[in-house]
Amino acid sequence: MDESGFTGEDLLHLEQPVFVHVSTCLSDEECAALAKDHFSGVQGDELKHKRLGRRPNGQSRILDFVNAVVGKDKFTIWLCHNEFTLLTYLVDLWVEPSMYKHGIDLYKDGGSVALSNMTYYCLKVFQSDRFLRGHLERFQRMMRFRTPQNYRKFFAMLHRDYLRTDKRTKDILVFYLGAGMELGYDLLARTPARALDPALTTTVSTCMHWRKRTDAPLRLIHDRSSNLSKDKWLWERIASAEIENVVLGIPSHEVVYPLNVEETEFADSHTHLQLQFCDLVAGACAEWARRFMDLPHDEGYVSKLEDSGIKELNLSTIWPAPEVDPEALGMKGWSGEHIEFLTKQFAEIDKRRARGN
């Protein structure tokens, strides 16, 4: 596994608007053959999209490579719109827990996604892009630098805008203001570090994808530079073999535990062609995605990537959409049972370990 656009918890980085997480199950022999066919004679210690994607010759090699692997079920792509992903964290970390305290499952039928979509599109229309981004900037600062001052500033500015805006905007902001009033600074202090880093979410989902395709134990090799290595304690819990066997969710959105990860290694990319190939695909996908955000991009290269079928490698996305209806979202029947399941499993694991079992 490797990533492109990795900025940790800075999801509003102007030069990295997209986060791409890529995985592959290519064997060493398959990698050697692909390297010989498509990258023979390339100078440098390792293959990097940032270097190869600058020139027509390098782009041509990448395109030939993508064409060679599409349709082979050897790669997956997770694509995240960073600004929108930050908004989903505001919903997941604050609004959902406040509603849960009142017996409301915001995950039911994709409610959290619907709220995120509505907020993203409506606030931009009712107010402006700058209006939404300003609040997201203050939210990100609060979550990264957990001070009472940043907490008060974020919710005070929400309250200020609630008082001065029209009813349509008020009807959206009240979800977020209510969460702050309900949960308070205590929630912020208790939230684990790096809670805004999408790498953990995409890694879990990707492992589930491969888990469904084989009963064999998975050996995960992740690029050493990823923040996942800093969250090793949490990853080890989620990947624990002590978690009960279960399949939750709905068709196409199944949650499967345990992940069946036998080993996790954090390695340098120059020692693994698989990591280098993930970098190439991630970089190509990030360039392709810029087209959909109306950002500067190499149109000729992007058009050829589109023609190559790179979108067929896509496993999932965190991306804004105008849909709010459960059927349109494809989430009818979804719920928060997987969160409750993991919470109980972690508690049981802690009890057993405390007893020395």
Image (tube, grey):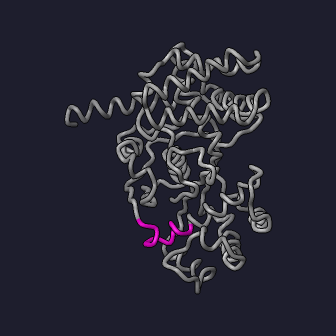
Q: How many marks?
A: 0
Residue 269: image location, x then y, percent: 46, 68
Q: Residue 172: say if magenta.
A: no
Left or right? Give the position of 2 relative to 296. Answer: left
User: Magenta segment range?
Assistant: 268-277
Residue 287: image location, x then y, percent: 69, 60
Left or right? Give the position of 197 relative to 231. Answer: right
Residue 190 visible in the snapshot = yes
Please name the residue shown 56% across and 34% down the image.
Answer: 89
Residue 241 visible in the snapshot = no
Q: Is residue 332 above or below residue 233?
A: above
Residue nearest the viewer, comparing 276 with 209: 276
Picture quadrant where residue 168 is located: top right
Picture quadrant where residue 54 is located: bottom right
Q: Residue furthest left?
A: 356
Residue nearest the viewer, comparing 202 with 73: 202
Please name the residue shown 79% across and 64% down the image.
Answer: 299
Secondary structure of the magenta portion, mostly? helix
Q: Is residue 118 above or below residue 273?
A: above
Picture quadrant where residue 310 is located: bottom right
Please name the residue shown 76% across and 63% down the image.
Answer: 302
Residue nearest the viewer, comparing 325 with 284: 284
Residue 210: image location, x then y, percent: 53, 54
Q: Quadrant of the C terminus?
A: top left
Residue 252: image location, x then y, percent: 64, 42
Q: Residue furthest bottom?
A: 41
Left or right? Give the position of 241 relative to 86. Answer: left
Left or right? Give the position of 130 relative to 159. Answer: right
Residue nearest the viewer, comparing 68 with 58: 58
Q: Residue 274: say if magenta.
A: yes
Q: Is residue 101 above or below residue 30?
A: above
